[in-house]
Image (cartoon, rainbow, N blue to C red):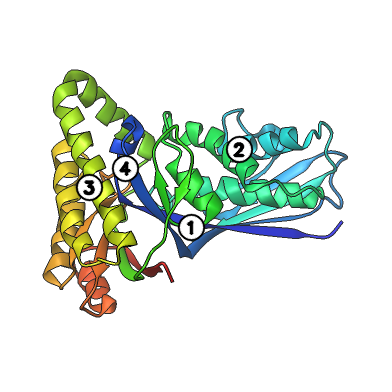
């Protein structure tokens, strides 16, 4: 059997972070400049039926059977084999590499699951449909996030901009005028499950107050979609700033994120906000009438550990 390789992009949430968990709309887009890669080779030299997993970025090298039952990679592989109806697989080696920073709000976990599911199913000669891959990745996301919205696995599986409301059918939409984002990484690992859990506790303690914050974020997402579809990219900057202010009130920003957001705006960004779970991870800035490298340099000067410039809708 030949080797098979599958890739999956990262993602950023443009609008609706956290509020999407509570049924409000969110907009997310793929980030193709970073990706997870899964490569499968026949298990030559391995015992019959053994699956060997290697993932250098997390210092993992282990037979599948020795991984904990709730290990995300183990779950992605076993769910894929179950979807294929394979109880006793041929031995194989799976290597996973990724340029997506871990616990940074760029969807690293979902990207690994999507790439792994596609590589495994292709290796066994039955590539899964996007809908099946998405369902597998969503199940694995429950390990990462506890109560995931489903937005990460959806935008990464379909690799296109998504307007997402939890529990409703996937919607893609047209981007009339492409725009450029600069992503700044605080370098602070911030597992989404922790931030989501803290927001849930705060919501339980003050449901009325947090429902207002969530509704405000949802309204911004609705207006942002209309602006993007109408080609009014200039409106997005103010909406990003408005969204960041609401996320600050939720308690999911941090001094490091706020510093990067302020630095981006001072460097000429039309708007900026945290993206994802918050407390660390990434922020995004909209570059309209300014060279995005100037914003990227300003972010590095303000303490960012890494930046990515990506065009949305190209």
Dot 4: element: loop
As measured in the structure, the alpha-carbon distance from the residue carrying label 4 to the one carrying label 1 is 21 Å
Q: Earlier in the sequence, mark 3 or mark 4?
A: 3
Q: Residue at x 55, y 33 (%)?
A: 139
Crowd rating for badge 4 (residues with CA inside 10 Å; few <14, some 14–19, many 20+): many
The earlier-in-sequence mark between 1 and 2 is: 2
Q: CA distance from mark 1 to mark 2?
A: 18 Å
Measure the alpha-carbon separation of dots 4 and 2. Answer: 22 Å
**Residue at the disc numbered 3:** 220
Q: Is residue 59 visible?
A: no
Residue 81 horizontal/vertical position (percent)? 74, 37
Closer to us: 194 or 222: 222
10 Å neighbourhood of mark 3: few (<14), some, or many (≥20)?
many
Q: Using the image as rendered, state which of residue 227 and residue 276 is in the foreground.
A: 227
Residue named by callout 1: 160
| Gap between marks 1 and 3 measured at Cα | 20 Å
Q: CA distance from mark 3 to mark 4?
A: 17 Å
Position of residue 122 in the picture relative to residue 161 (left or right):
right
Q: Earlier in the sequence, mark 2 or mark 3?
A: 2
Image coordinates of residue 87 in percent, x first then y, are: 81, 31
Q: Earlier in the sequence, mark 4 or mark 2?
A: 2
219 is higher (above) or lower (below) than 6: above
Q: Earlier in the sequence, mark 1 or mark 3?
A: 1
Q: Residue 264 is drawn in which quadrant?
A: bottom left
Query: Mark 4 = which residue?
Result: 277
Residue 314 vertical placement versus 205 (above, below): below
């Amino acid at each position: 059997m030949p080797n098979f390789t599958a890739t999956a992009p990262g993602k950023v949430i443009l609008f609706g972070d956290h509020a999407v968990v509570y049924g409000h709309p969110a907009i997310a887009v793929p980030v193709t400049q970073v990706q997870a890669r899964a490569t499968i080779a026949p298990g030559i030299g391995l015992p019959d039926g053994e699956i060997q997993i290697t993932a250098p970025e997390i210092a993992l090298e282990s037979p599948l059977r020795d991984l904990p039952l709730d290990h995300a990679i183990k779950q992605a592989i076993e769910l894929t084999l179950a979807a294929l109806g394979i109880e006793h697989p041929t031995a194989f080696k799976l290597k996973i590499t990724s340029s997506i920073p871990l616990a940074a709000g760029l969807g690293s976990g979902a990207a690994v699951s999507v790439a792994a599911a596609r590589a495994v199913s292709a290796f066994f000669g039955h590539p899964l449909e996007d809908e099946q891959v998405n369902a597998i990745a969503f199940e694995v996301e429950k390990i990462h996030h506890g109560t995931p919205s489903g937005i990460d696995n959806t935008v990464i599986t379909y690799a296109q901009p998504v307007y997402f409301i939890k529990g409703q059918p996937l919607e893609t939409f047209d981007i009339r005028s492409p725009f450029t984002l600069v992503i700044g990484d605080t370098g602070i690992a911030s597992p989404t499950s922790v931030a989501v859990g803290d927001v849930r506790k705060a919501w339980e303690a003050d449901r009325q107050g947090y429902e207002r914050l969530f509704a405000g974020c949802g309204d911004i997402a609705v207006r942002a979609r209309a602006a993007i579809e109408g080609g009014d990219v200039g409106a997005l900057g103010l909406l990003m700033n408005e969204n960041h202010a609401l996320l600050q009130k939720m308690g999911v920003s941090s001094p490091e994120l706020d510093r990067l957001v302020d630095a981006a705006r001072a460097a000429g960004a039309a708007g900026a906000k945290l993206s994802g779970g918050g407390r660390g991870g990434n922020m995004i800035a909209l570059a309209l009438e300014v060279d995005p490298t100037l914003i990227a340099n300003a972010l590095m000067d303000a303490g960012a550990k890494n930046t990515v410039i990506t065009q949305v809708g190209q």
